[in-house]
Amino acid sequence: MQQEIAFIQHFYTKTIDFFANYSIQIIGALIIVLIGWFLSKYVFNLLMKFFAKHDFDPTLGKFAANGVRILIFGAMIVVAIGKLGISIAPFIAAVGAVFLTAGLAIQGSVANYAAGISLIITRPFKIGDTILVNNVYGEVEEIMLAYTTLRTEDEELITVPNKHMIGEVIVNSFSYRIVESSVGISYNDNADKAISVIKEVIDRYENVSNDNAAIVGIAKFGDSAVEIGIRYWVPTRNFFKFQYEVNLLIYKALREEGITIPFPQRDVHLFQPNL
């Protein structure tokens, strides 16, 4: 019992001595940390307002503002540690060792973040663009450091790790996606007239892009029909809906003009051998 009381008294004395000797340093360090917190937050908000005012890219602006905030707060923490009289050299070495170990353990995640930084800097696409990468098609909805999200016409949200974006072929259709289709007409019909009818249908359709003119022409000569190739651009979010509507309009227009869409057929000739 006496040993326990002596231990408590010794602990109490040491605690009082510590706070008596280092109370000013501890209070100063806490004040420095608080100043660093509020200062970093203030600078972050200031930069975000500046970037928004000058139409800066949202993803790149947020990344830059966050980087500055972390640097300011980290610098103030280092100053606070120095205020306590603690050497920061071993601390920095320990932090470096921790980050090295963590980096080896989560190489995939680190690769995603590194790729995200590269995407933000090089900007091969932006929010609202339509991209094709790794056989995945969709409208870019969000670009994060670790991943990029794409939204399809079916409202499916596709999450693509950024490491699969770097070093891959990226097809950027911007806000539109190309429709490539064809329709066959009879060899007895006027191909020029059919091309003109199809072109007129597409030009009248209000949802087709005006920035890229539709392309209509003879794609190939089939066994039973002349294949008319059709290429035009529609918004990605309603890609299939608009494609089906245009197909129906083309079908009706060709029928009204008396242009035949033939079905595959074979001519069979029977020869009777001479007996």
Image (tube, rainbow, N blue to C red):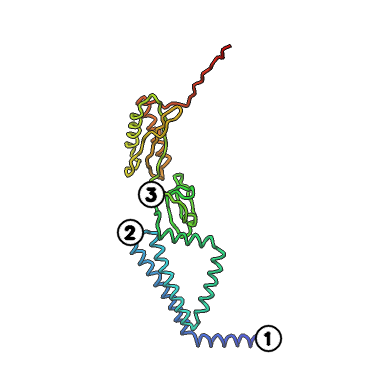
Q: Amino acid at mark 1?
A: Met
| Quarter of the N terminus within the rendering | bottom right
Residue that label 1 marks: 1
Which quadrant would residue 37 be assigned to in this image?
bottom left
Residue 122 screen position, x and y as percent: 40, 58
Q: Nearer the viewer, mark 2 or mark 3?
A: 3
The furthest residue to the top: 275
Marks 2 and 3, how far apart in space? 19 Å
Q: Amino acid at mark 3?
A: Phe
Nearer to the camera, 180 or 218: 218
Residue 143 screen position, x and y as percent: 43, 56
Q: Amino acid at mark 2?
A: Asp
Which quadrant would residue 12 be assigned to in this image?
bottom right
Disc 2 vs disc 3: Cβ atoms closer than 8 Å? no
Marks 1 and 3, how far apart in space? 79 Å
Residue for point 38% across, 48% down: 175
Looking at the image, residue 106 sits to the left or right of residue 53; the answer is: right
Residue 173 screen position, x and y as percent: 39, 47
Residue 57 screen position, x and y as percent: 37, 59
Q: Earlier in the sequence, mark 1 or mark 3?
A: 1
Marks 2 and 1, how far apart in space? 72 Å
Q: Nearer the viewer, mark 2 or mark 1?
A: 2
Residue that label 3 marks: 174
SS for tag 3? strand
Report crowding for label 1: few under 14, some 14 to 19, many 20 or more residues within 10 A (C-alpha): few
Residue that label 2 marks: 55
SS for tag 2? loop
Which quadrant would residue 2 be assigned to in this image?
bottom right
